[in-house]
Image (cartoon, rainbow, N blue to C red):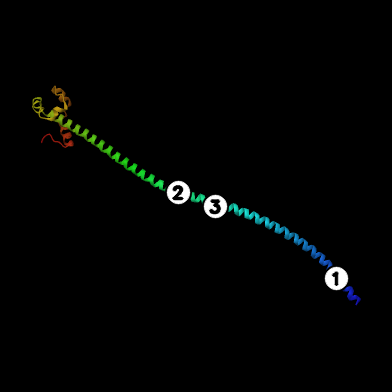
Amino acid sequence: MASELELSKQRITELEAENVNLRRKLSVSDAEIAELMRRNNEFLRANKEYNERRDAENAKLRARIEELEKNKEDSSAENVRRDVEIAEIKAEVVKLAEGAQARDNNEESKQLTSRQSEAISKEMISGYDQNTIDEIEPQSSVSSNNINLASNEDVSDHALSPSAKSSEAVALGYDSRS
């Protein structure tokens, strides 16, 4: 039995040594656990702060988005208003341009009519002698144009040649032969 007792004592010694090793490992593990818990708490605190900053930033961004959307609606309405104003101005410009063009066309028409009248008068004058002109002058509208018919030379200087006279009369839509 002594050998059994010795074996049991030896076994107890071995178990006590193992127990010491296990307690040392446990204390190391406890220290590691404590460090991990401290780091975890630090991480959770940092994460909470980050989330709070992110939430605050998100709130600011949402407010900014709402403001931009409101401004977008305001500027869209203003753009529509400006588009209407631009269309009105363009219509007015077109109207003014058409009026100016009509006025220019009217002036050109008056000038053309005046030139035609002068050409016809000169043609008629060159076709008649002075006596005939003196007879026609009070009745015609030529006298209102203040044409100086003082001498035949003045009239003949301005008279057209017969071929030019007839071609100009035809171009103007008049024929002296009729």
**Circle 2: element type:** helix
List the residue tagged with mark 3. 59
Q: Which residue is drawn at 73% across and 59% down?
A: 34
Q: Badge 1 is on which residue? A: 12
For residue 46, which quarter of the picture? bottom right
Q: Which amino acid does label 3 sit on?
A: Ala
Residue ID for mark 2: 72
- The three-letter code of the residue at mark 1 reads Ile
Tag nearer the camera, 1 or 3: 3
**Could you tell whether 29 is left or right of 173 in the image?**
right
Asked whether the beta carbons under mark 2 and mark 1 sit within 8 Å of each other, the answer is no
The foreground one among 159 and 66 is 66
Q: Is mark 1 on a helix, strand or loop?
A: helix
Q: Hey, which quadrant is residue 140 in on the image?
A: top left
The image quarter in which residue 132 lies: top left
Picture residue at 65% right of the left edge, 55% below the top: 45
Instruction: Say few, some or many: other residues with alpha carbon within 10 Å of mark 2 (under 14 / 14 to 19 / 20 or more).
Output: few
Q: How far apart are marks 2 and 1 (CA)?
A: 85 Å
**Which mark, by number, is residue 154?**
none
Marked residue nearer the N-terminal end (2 or 3): 3
- 138 vs 87, left or right, is left
Residue 22: % across, % down: 79, 65
Q: In this view, does 119 lie to the left or right of 40?
A: left
First of labels 2, 1 by sequence position: 1
Up-down relation of residue 2 to residue 78 (above or below)? below
Q: How crowded is mark 3: few (under 14 residues within 10 Å), some or many (20 or more)?
A: few
Q: Residue 54: x and y, percent?
A: 58, 53
Query: Badge 1, how many Cα within 10 Å: few under 14, some, many 20+?
Result: few
Q: Where is residue 77 in the image (x, y as percent from the top left)?
A: 41, 48
Q: Which amino acid does label 2 sit on?
A: Lys
Tally of numbered discs: 3
